[in-house]
Amino acid sequence: MHIPDGYLDLPIAGIFYVLSLAVLGYSIYKLKDEKLTPLFGIVAAAIFAAQMLNWPIPGGTSAHFVGGALAGILLGPYAGSLAMAVVLTIQCLVFADGGITALGANVWNMAIVNVFIGYYAYRALEKFGKSVASFVAGWIGITIAAIFAGIEIGLSTSFGYGLSVTVPVMGLWHGMLGIVEGTITAGVVSYIASSRPDVLEEKVTPGKAAIAVIAAMIVVSPLFAYAAELVGYSEPLENAAEMLGLTENPIYEGLLPDYTVPGIDPYAGTLIAGVVGTVIVLALGYLMARYARTT
Amino acid sequence: MHELLERTIKEASDYFQNFLIHEYSKKSVLHKIDGRIKLVSTVVFVILAVSTFNLNKVIMVLLFLFVISAITGLSLKKIFERIWLFTLFSYIVVLPLSIYNPLYGITFTLRVAASLIAIQILIMTTSFAEICSALRSFKIPKTFVSALWIAYRYAILMFRELFAILLARESRRVAKGSHMDVWRKGGEAVGLFFLRSFERAERVQLAIEARGGNVVEYRGKIKKLDLIYSTIVIFTAFWWVII
């Protein structure tokens, strides 16, 4: 499910970087008072090792385990998403498994959607038994994560197939592989429940407001990506003006008119304008934060 | 369970080849360049490759990457060995579209190939400790970078622990198990493995506290060689813009 570089449009990759960083940043903030660094590291290494297991399936083929829902169930959604993000970052920077520009999207799918949905599915269904709850958590976590990956690549114009192909392919295929994921998750959780039930006690979880924001981000994130493609990266107002035959008559062009750098390739100009804008906003934010600290 | 073990050994040996190549690859000039510069350069190369469908620009990025690898002493054969499979896979994925638009298929595949080469150049010439230091320099939170470093260092050890658990269970098995048995016993083994990983995390936490922390931090000065490499990357970007 690791999306490589070249499959996603940069604006879509950027959106998922921002969303992922927001959730991971909040997770680190929530866990800042707990000495959990070795736990993230060791459990991340354990997930990494467990992903290497090659589970035989009748018929001669085999399947792998991803471990997102399990990470959520064992560590809670905050620490679980951080542990999975550690695994994905190592896979990207050491094994070239998943792209650098696509890391934000991969983290979003496998470390946030998979972990949060897996964790809450488990908690919601726990009353029906830990095995059933963990099976559904493993299955639904990986399936929805794959659907998100399908949405991201399907909305990217770089990838020649549309949503009508990518979402069913990713969703159906991972829906079947999800049975393996669910079975392994159920096996592991059942064993832990019988030998160390304390490990499965409720973990540090988001408050109602935080979970509402994260859930809304998960639900709305494909719309951001869709909207970016739908409007062709231009202002809807500009499209409307073009349809009505109106022309611009600017009083002042600005230093980077229309997010471009005069005299160079428009696409590169937009990239440069984006970097300049980001630096200005960060600098202003930094100055305001400093000012706030001194007053 | 022997099937699970055999398949896993094969999978792991292929996977850990990357660790070995990564740690013991032939030294090149690129090894001497600061990790921060190499990390940023990799991101720049990947963005240049994936932000266009202009075939000339994609080929230009590929050529620069090949020339940089060849001049600095990296093995092009090794790079090819590590990228061909996924490049071919990408071409097969877009093959149905390439029948009607061959240019799209070629450009898409070369974009993927260029990105993979850029990442491989980073991987083959930069230790993970350097990458972690570079991430800290870019203000990535200490908690996350330390966890990355611990996970990297413990990955092989944790795999050995998992493997030892599986092997011990297999050695105690007397009857041929069904697929269901493999899954049930495998699930139990992985459950035990995760419990052990929790216990290990506690021991590592105590060890870190006893030693007073072990965060990877390194602030080397930018050298002349780093500036030369940065200039090459900037020149590539400049050339990419004007062609």
Image: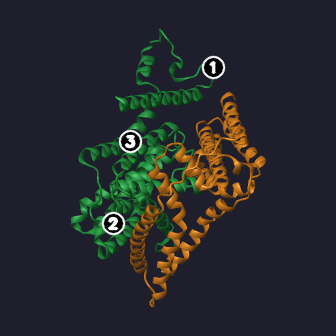
Sooner in the amino-acid sequence: mark 3 or mark 2: 2
Residue nearest the observer in this picture, A34 or A27:
A34
The colour scheme is by chain
Any part of residue A1 in sight: no
Q: Pinpoint residue B240: horizontal percent, then vertical percent.
A: 67, 33
To which residue does mark 1 refer? A263
Point 48% across, 83% down: residue: B168
To which residue does mark 2 refer? A135
Point 54% across, 56% down: residue: A91
SS category of the residue bearing label 3 = helix
Decide if residue A72 is on the left or right side of residue B150: left
Point 58% across, 56% down: residue: A94
Decide if residue A40 is on the left or right side of residue B127: left
Sooner in the amino-acid sequence: mark 3 or mark 1: 3
Point 41% across, 62% down: residue: A39
Looking at the picture, which amino acid does disc 1 mark? Answer: Gly
CA gap between label 1 and label 2 equals 58 Å
Q: Which chain is green?
A: A
Q: Are marks 1 and 2 on the same chain?
A: yes
SS category of the residue bearing label 2 = helix
To which residue does mark 3 refer? A221
Q: Which chain is orange?
A: B
Q: Nearer the viewer, mark 1 or mark 2?
A: 1
Q: Residue furthest bottom?
A: B174
Rendered view: B31 above or below A284 = below
